[in-house]
Amino acid sequence: MIREKTTTSPADIYLPQPAAVTKAEPMTKLEMFFEFKLAGGRELGHLPGQFCEVSIPGIGEAPISISSSPTYRDGFQMVVRRVGNVSGAMHGLKAGGTVGIRGPFGTSFPVDGAMKGKDLLFICGGIGLVPVRSAIQYALDHRRDYGRVMILFGTRTPADRLFVDDMARWAGQKDVTVLETVDRGDESWKGNVGVITTLMPKVKLDPARTVAVVCGPPIMYKFVIIELDKMKVPQESIYVSLERHMKCGVGKCGHCQVNGIYVCQEGPVFRYADIAGVREAI
């Protein structure tokens, strides 16, 4: 069953709300999958592409993308890469544990705006699939509102692949194309080998009716944008997530500032046409 998305959030953006860990499972050597439920059964009320501040008492807090769609009824999901104190502490959590949640914060992918009625091209590198998964799920749960769905995903190795079961399920749906690549294959890998731009010529699209969503490591953006330009996709139809810059989530620390833009307030999702001339953004 699909529910309509909501946009409600706690009145106090500085006060964490308790959330119970209902599932904690390793996905790769570095990534852990989590499912949470807010106390009292309150809905998170997020939009695809937004993030929350997740806190561990005595350790600190960090901005984490929401990887599940608002159409998912049973709590919300995140994937956490172990890179620091907070994420390291989270990797020690088990079902029944508790974290603090502030948010949701930030801008979202325009699933009910510019993306509606269009063909969708999702280009994700590594952990960039995590926030984009929310938009993919949303589009597939509202399938009649969109045209073709094309998903390109690249990782370093086959062992780094995320949401493998989701990928297989998405690939089996009508008018959905899923293409994957790895930088380095192994004996078990029978798919494409190479950077993610090697997948783009394999996709046939109508640039006038396509909206592209891009998320991944910093180096990926430049070359993906070049390829999209070759494919004649307008800059106004390209959306990127710059969440890698964020820290506090509410525009206080200044960590996310890029030439006057506060990513946590004006992003993390941006229309590429609006930041194409901003140095250091891409």
Image: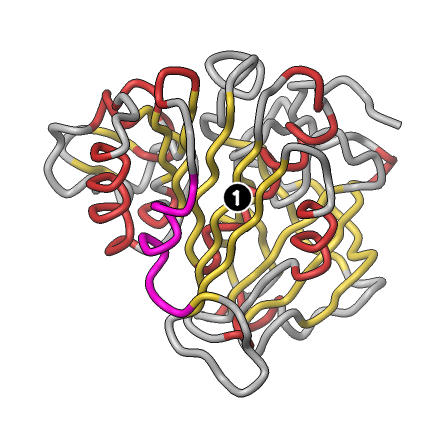
Residues shaded magenta: 193-203
**What's the residue at 42%, 55% (across, down)?**
125
Quarter of the image where one finds residue 59: bottom right
Compared across the picture, whether 130 is left or right of 282 comes to right
Q: x and y percent of residue 85 in the render?
A: 48, 70
Do we see residue 249 in this rendering?
yes
State whether residue 98 is above or below residue 150.
Answer: below
Q: x and y percent of residue 120 in the render?
A: 50, 29
**What's the residue at 75%, 47% (across, down)?**
19
Quadrant of the drawing holding the N terminus: top right
Circle 1 residue: 151
**What's the residue at 47%, 39% (across, down)?**
122
**What's the residue at 76%, 17% (across, down)?**
4
Quarter of the image where one finds residue 98: bottom right
Q: How is the image coloured?
A: secondary structure
**Residue nearest the viewer, comparing 6 with 159:** 159
Kindly state the secondary structure of the residue where label 1 is placed.
Answer: strand
Image label count: 1
Residue 232 drawn in magenta: no
* Amino acid beneath label 1: Ile
Residue 198 drawn in magenta: yes
Compared across the picture, whether 194 is left or right of 12 comes to left
Do we see residue 247 in this rendering?
no
**Residue nearest the viewer, comparing 161 with 54:** 161
Q: x and y percent of residue 132 in the render?
A: 53, 41
Kindly give the residue lying farthest to the bottom in the view shown. 187
Crowd tier of the residue under label 1, counting other residues whose Cα lies within 10 Å: few below 14, some 14–19, many 20 or above: many
State whether residue 274 is above or below residue 27.
Answer: above
Quadrant of the drawing holding the C terminus: top left
Q: x and y percent of residue 36 in the render?
A: 76, 49
Compared across the picture, whether 20 is left or right of 15 comes to right
Quarter of the image where one finds residue 31: bottom right
